[in-house]
Amino acid sequence: DAGITQSPRHKVTETGTPVTLRCHQTENHRYMYWYRQDPGHGLRLIHYSYGVKDTDKGEVSDGYSVSRSKTEDFLLTLESATSSQTSVYFCAISDPTLSHIQYFGAGTRLSVL
Amino acid sequence: DQQVKQNSPSLSVQEGRISILNCDYTNSMFDYFLWYKKYPAEGPTFLISISSIKDKNEDGRFTVFLNKSAKHLSLHIVPSQPGDSAVYFCAAVGRTSGTYKYIFGTGTRLKVLA
């Protein structure tokens, strides 16, 4: 299994509070991704990173920001959480120089009340 | 605009029979297509993939077929087993502005009946 750790695994928070989710990898993969999974929508890309300090938006980036200060860590921040951001969040990694396969973490279940 | 579509939200199959999961895409520039399997409370796990230059890839009980002219791929599972019951996502990989992005379908929930 790819060495990907997401923390926390579960979080309950209140509307309007900031939340940061962490993804840590031990594989030294160049690319890291944040997705959210919602019923009827599958996996939707929030933001991704193609190197340290190199990030770009995905299809559902509004209300989210990311940072990648070192290869192994990719942080997702909900600046002011809303109930619509209640979801399961997955981090993924890949390295196109090795293969096209994307590996996923176990997910973080976030509830915004 | 959904670039990758899985039009069947669910599928039930008898144990031992064939399961066929379908996926359609709209962008002819995708380089690879992948299938992932997801159990509840776990992350998706890679199952099988196919390059856009091939039309078939096989790995044990799993075979993926790619029809580029129809922009359609399918995953065949033969024989189906109860442990195959999960949500299956297809994904397409493309290169945009020099970076790789993965587009996922909405998933198909497979239930294999014992």
Image (cartoon, coloured by chain):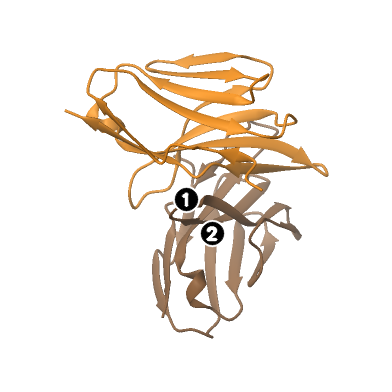
Q: Disc 1 versus disc 2: distance between alpha carbons?
A: 8 Å
Q: Secondary structure at mark 2?
A: strand
What's the chain of the residue with tag 2?
A
Question: Would you call the spot at circle 1 few (<14 residues within 10 Å), some (14-19), or many (20 or more)?
Answer: many
Q: Which residue is mark 2?
A: A23
Horizontal and vertical percent for residue B10? 36, 39
For chain B, the rendered hue is: orange
Location of the N terminus of chain A (image quadrant): top left
Q: Vertically, is B83 above or below B19?
A: below
Amino acid type of the residue tagged 2 in the rendering:
Cys
Residue at the spot x=43%, y=55% of the render? Answer: A39
Q: Vertically, is B7 above or below A91?
A: above
Image check: A26 left or right of B71?
left
For chain A, the rendered hue is: brown
Residue at the spot x=68%, y=56% of the render? Answer: A58
Location of the C terminus of chain A (image quadrant): bottom left
Residue A105 circle label: 1
Image check: B84 left or right of B6?
left
Amino acid type of the residue tagged 1 in the rendering:
Gly
Quick one: which residue is furthest to the left in this view?
B114
